[in-house]
Amino acid sequence: MIIAKTPFRMSFFGGGTDMPEFYKEHGGAVLSTTFDKYCYVNVRHLPPFFEYTTELSYSRTERVKDIDEIQHPAIREAMRFLHMRNIRLTYEADLPARSGLGTSSSFCVGMLDAFYALKGKYADKRKLADDAIYLERVLCKEAGGIQDQIAASFGGMNKISFSSNGYEVNPVIIFPDKKKLLNENLLLYFTGFSRFSADIQVQTKKEMKDKLSQLKEMYRLVDEAENILTNKESDLDEFGRLLDYSWRLKKETGSGISTNTIDEIYEMAKAAGALGGKLLGAGGGGFLLFYVQKEKQEAVKKALDKLLYVPFEFENHGVQIVYYAAEKID
């Protein structure tokens, strides 16, 4: 039996520049971190006592005799890709799916890590990220960028740079006290509704060619934001103000990114004292992140008291196998 634990991610700057249609020509980068909310993928070989050969438990239960009968596209294609047979797989998570935190990619990374471990093979973080990108974007033909798979696999706070030659992951070197203050100044809220990221990404991709100036500016902001974090003398509050500027740019890159309800919530938080924030993920719903100075946090929490507040802490590990029990298979 194998249990893989994979963190979710929050992307601060550069979202959208991780789309191949953009970065292969213009370059791209994101500044993101993983945090202490996880998904867990439990995998074992199915004992030979059942009329079905594969059992899957996620938001629904599937019991099938043939891989081709599996309805979940990522599980079906991953099992084909790694030649998995006779599997029992269970998925659990700390936060809901389709919420803008890279949940589907975290699941794919964790599932692949668990599959490799069940086969007695080791896959490093880059291989897991690459395989998850291939699984989602090629085998499952889902629209979107490639930052989520990389963030979930590597873990930590990173600047991930994209080019026609691939990607590089560089940890953001931030003073511990400043990192702690950043964590304390960020408030995470669930909007109460979710959406399929791929659906938003399809529309955004269609509109991207007309939004190059916004995407190039969002790309530029990654270095500016990193400098705020790594420069000991910089004012951390500028990170919050930059989030506000970047979010307003992001909304211009696709008609489905925000909604009237999200805009109203955002402006309520700003009026109560938030310096800035953003909707996490591709858009349309999920989680809102705000940068709020400590003395203003009670006012913001009061203004948003109808939403679910989710405390969190940054994490640095990425995907991990947290339980490994070898099985003897004849």
Image (tube, rainbow, N blue to C red):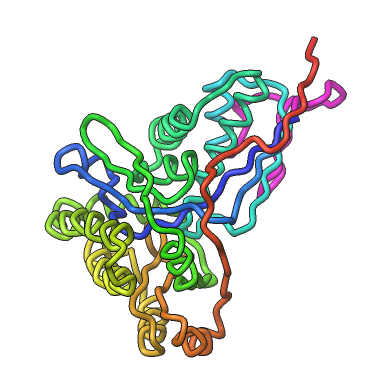
Q: How many labels does the image show?
A: 0
Magenta span of residues: 44-73
Q: Is residue 65 magenta?
A: yes
Q: Is residue 77 left or right of residue 150?
A: right
The residue lying at 58 percent from left, 44 percent from top is 6
Q: Is residue 8 left or right of residue 157?
A: right
The residue lying at 33 percent from left, 60 percent from top is 229
Q: Is residue 53 left or right of residue 280?
A: right
Q: Nearer the viewer, residue 210 or 223?
A: 223
> Which of the 4 quarters of the picture holds residue 257?
bottom left
Q: Position of residue 239 (x, y in %)?
A: 31, 68
Specify the quadrant that holds the N terminus.
Answer: top right
Q: Is residue 267 magenta?
A: no
Q: Where is residue 209 in the image (x, y as percent from the top left)?
A: 15, 51
Q: In this view, does 323 lie above or below 249?
A: above
Q: Position of residue 251 (x, y in %)?
A: 27, 67
Q: Nearer the viewer, residue 269 or 282?
A: 269
Q: In this view, does 256 lie above or below 116?
A: below
Specify the quadrant that holds the C terminus.
Answer: top right
Considering every residue shown, the one lying at the far front of the view is: 233
Q: Position of residue 70 (x, y in %)?
A: 62, 33
Q: Nearer the viewer, residue 33 or 116?
A: 33
The residue lying at 29 percent from left, 45 percent from top is 18
Considering every residue shown, the one lying at the far right of the view is: 49
